[in-house]
Amino acid sequence: MLKGQTAIVTGASRGIGKEIAVKLAQQGMKLTLIGSSEEIHQSAEDLNKMGFTDVLPIQADISDEAQVMAAVEKTLQTYKRLDLLVNNAGMGFFKQVDETTLEEWKKVFEVNVQGVFLGSRAVLPHMKERKSGTIITISSDVARYTIPNGSAYTATKYAVQGFSGSLAQEVREYGIRVGTINPGMVDTFFAESKQGLEEKKDWLKVEDIANAVVYMASAPKHMMIDEIVLHPFVQNYPIS
């Protein structure tokens, strides 16, 4: 279903984003990998070693309009088409409101919300012209409820959920599908943590999220999956 198609994956240097790239490559997709550090080139090299040669690494700041536009243009120049955008890049910190600086508040919104907006907007002209395409944003389960000590992060995920819902309604006449994947606790590098810690052994794995992306992206054209919510059994959470 995805073989021969092209995808952009942001935040693909490690963790969830890198695993998404691997799973999409295994489906036969051509890839552009975007990351904020030089580590993105190592991700591309690792995929090359697995036998996947159609991998374009781009070091870019997804909150910068010019850099995002340039990355999308480079993708189209290289592959001549763009079928899937995975807005995976994100950041988070967890503090009480009166301990949060304005700079921290702005930064998390720039990456988590502005980055999703800029990436989605940049791919739309091509997808509209082709009357086809899928935009998937990796959000969080806190897009559905609130947590203490996470006001900035939670606010960005509510914003992303609202943005994605509105965008889905705007572009459905063009055959473009928009959805979110909202995971709970994942064993990854999020919030400066380490992957593979003993206390995370029963959490979701990065491949769980990547498999959800493949499922959503592979849905038949008559099907639109608005949202996938994933949790490990060990996580208790409020449902609202």
Image (tube, rainbow, N blue to C red):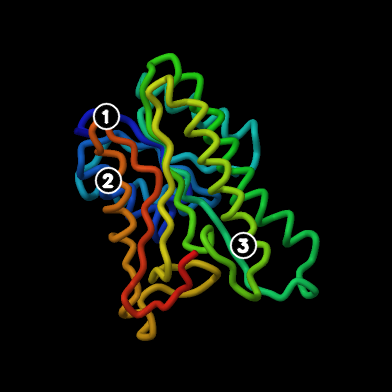
Residue position marked by numbered label 1 in the rendering: 222
- Which of the two discs, 1 and 2, sits closer to the camera? 1
Mark 3 packing: few (<14 Cα in 10 Å), some, or many (20+)?
many
Mark 1 → mark 3, Cα distance in angstroms: 34 Å
Q: Quadrant of residue 148?
A: bottom right
For marks 1 and 2, the one nearer the N-term is 2
Q: Residue at x 57, y 41 (%)?
A: 163
In the image, is 159 to the left or to the right of 213? right
For marks 1 and 3, the one nearer the N-term is 3
Q: Residue at x 51, y 51 (%)?
A: 89
Q: Quadrant of residue 64?
A: top right
For marks 2 and 3, the one nearer the N-term is 3
Q: Residue at x 38, y 58 (%)?
A: 229
In the image, is 181 to the left or to the right of 220? right
- Which of the two discs, 1 and 3, sits closer to the camera? 1
Whether the residues at callouts 1 and 2 have beta carbons within 8 Å, the answer is no
Residue 78 to residue 10: above or below: above
